[in-house]
Image (cartoon, rainbow, N blue to C red):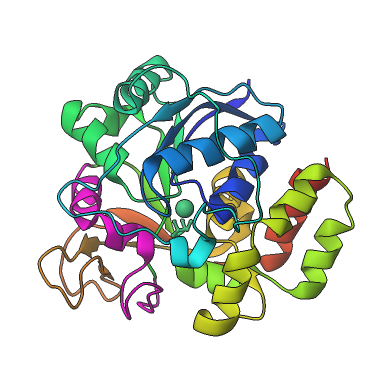
Amino acid sequence: MKRQMWIDTDTASDDAVALIIALRHPDIEVRGISVVAGNVPLEMGVQNALYTAELCASTVPIYVGAAQPLVRTLDTAQFVHGVDGMGDIGLPLFGRVPTPGDAIDEIISAAHRHAHELELVTLGPLTNIALALRKDPTIASLIKRCVVMGAVADHIGNVTQVAEFNMWVDPESVDIVLQSGMKLEFVGWDISRTEAVITPKEADAIRALGTDRAQFAVDIQRVLERFCAEETHLAGFDLPDPIAIAYAINEKVATETQEWFLAVETQSHLTRGMVVMDTLGVMHEAANARVVTKASHEVFMTMLMEALGS
Ligand code: RIB
Ligand code: CA
């Protein structure tokens, strides 16, 4: 029996590679993809997800979710991934039709249909998940695990000094998820910038795989590559969502994890979206999340090359 997975995504250039990893993995059945506004406006994220699924010859249902955070106005990351989110390389990212149905209701239905088996992976802001939990809190105990690409265990942010983008966009939704009782596992941007940076040499090796998906996976990082060079000063482009989904599929991607109490800042402007991790236990609260604190670039790269080369 294949493992049952649901992916929630704000589909831009790194999300797309994460979708390929899951859609191409022999052990994974992706039961649905729900799209949320984040990197790009919602409709753009929907088109990007549909294009990527088509590239994988997948018929996975793709549902339209929330167009705005719970209470904040949407701030996209088009300065990071491009206006279309996919490197602005002229891909035909229009005209595809999502699956009829409300993403929030479909997440809830899938949690009940695949009770205690569904592995939820979130690659964007948590708006859809928070709305689903509000509508049906029982899904927190029905979802087997929720792997979140988000936060930073070293508290070095990528959208502000202390906050990671997915958490910063909609901190109120993070607060709902953190208090839901769901089995949460976080793969932060600290893991991406240390173990998921693709160097130019590795990008060439990916292209050398010779498949359409491999070419696509590198080409769409064009804007991200420039952002990493000029802003985050990494030795290539980093792939946060792909290493998060690789961990969700194969826990050996993580070489160290911790069980900590996490809480998110929703009041302060300065520290909005900071996910505080109680590493010393000084808050005397029970741990509510597993956090990946070290990972293997080698294990991740093996999974990435397999997904893009197959
Ligand atoms: O901080 C990285 C996260 O923000 C990734 O999910 C990326 O796609 C953006 O959504
Ligand atoms: Ca994302």
Would residue 292 appear left or right of 153 to someone viewing this image?
right
Whether 4 is drawn above or below 280: the answer is above
Image quadrant where residue 188 sits: bottom left
Whether 103 is drawn above or below 167: the answer is above
Instruction: Inspect this view and state whether residue 188 appears.
Output: no
Range of residues picked out in magenta: 153-180
Q: Is residue 176 magenta?
A: yes
x, y percentage for residue 204? 84, 66
Looking at the picture, tell me which residue is in the foreground, 288 or 203: 203
- Which residue does the image show at 26% across and 69% down from the upper left? 274
- The quarter of the picture where the N terminus appears is top right
x, y percentage for residue 57? 71, 27
- The quarter of the picture where the C terminus appears is top right
- Which residue does the image show at 77% across and 74% down from the upper left? 200
x, y percentage for residue 277? 29, 69
Would residue 292 appear left or right of 65 to someone viewing this image?
right
